[in-house]
Amino acid sequence: MSLSFGSGFDESDSPGWGAPVQLEEEDVVTSAIKKEKVVKEITAQQEDLRALLARVKEVQGDVDKLISGNETLQMYIDNLTLQMAKRR
């Protein structure tokens, strides 16, 4: 007895919920190679980002030192200006 589920669908037309269709061995290998390549690219990009982050932190440290130095110089200039104004 064949079941009919309306127009255009017959149980015999579909493999149904049976065993999954097996991929060819080449497809599995190709897929694994592609995945490995993507993982390697992601890992390389992560390493590049880590290097960039380290460089950013280094530059930020240099900027902080320069800002501190500039503040010290500005205080020195302000003090000299006040001393010169008092002498007049």
Image (cartoon, helix red, strand yellow):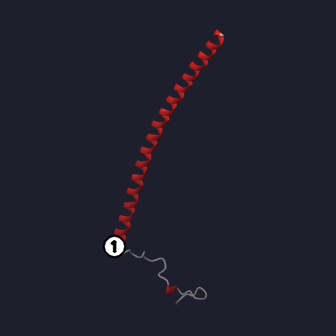
**Residue closest to the far front:** 88
Q: Amino acid at mark 1?
A: Glu
| Residue at the image point whose x is 62% and y is 13% from the top | 84
User: How busy is the neighbourhood of tag 1: few (under 14 within 10 Å), some, or many (20 plus)?
Assistant: few
- Residue 39 lies, with reference to residue 84, above or below; the image says below
Q: Nearer the viewer, residue 44 or 63?
A: 63
- Quadrant into which the C terminus falls: top right
**Residue closest to the far bottom:** 1
Q: Secondary structure at mark 1?
A: helix
- Residue 23 lies, with reference to residue 77, above or below; the image says below
Residue 78: where, in percent of width, then height? 61, 19
| Residue at the image point whose x is 47% and y is 40% from the top | 56
Residue 54: where, in percent of width, then height? 44, 40
**Lateral position of residue 19 relative to residue 29, left or right:** right
Name the residue carrying label 1.
26
| Number of marks in picture | 1
| Residue at the image point whose x is 57% and y is 88% from the top | 8
Q: Nearer the viewer, residue 51 or 70?
A: 70
Residue 82: where, in percent of width, then height? 63, 15
**Lateral position of residue 75 relative to residue 34, left or right:** right
| Residue at the image point whose x is 33% and y is 73% from the top | 26
- Residue 66 lies, with reference to residue 9, above or below; the image says above
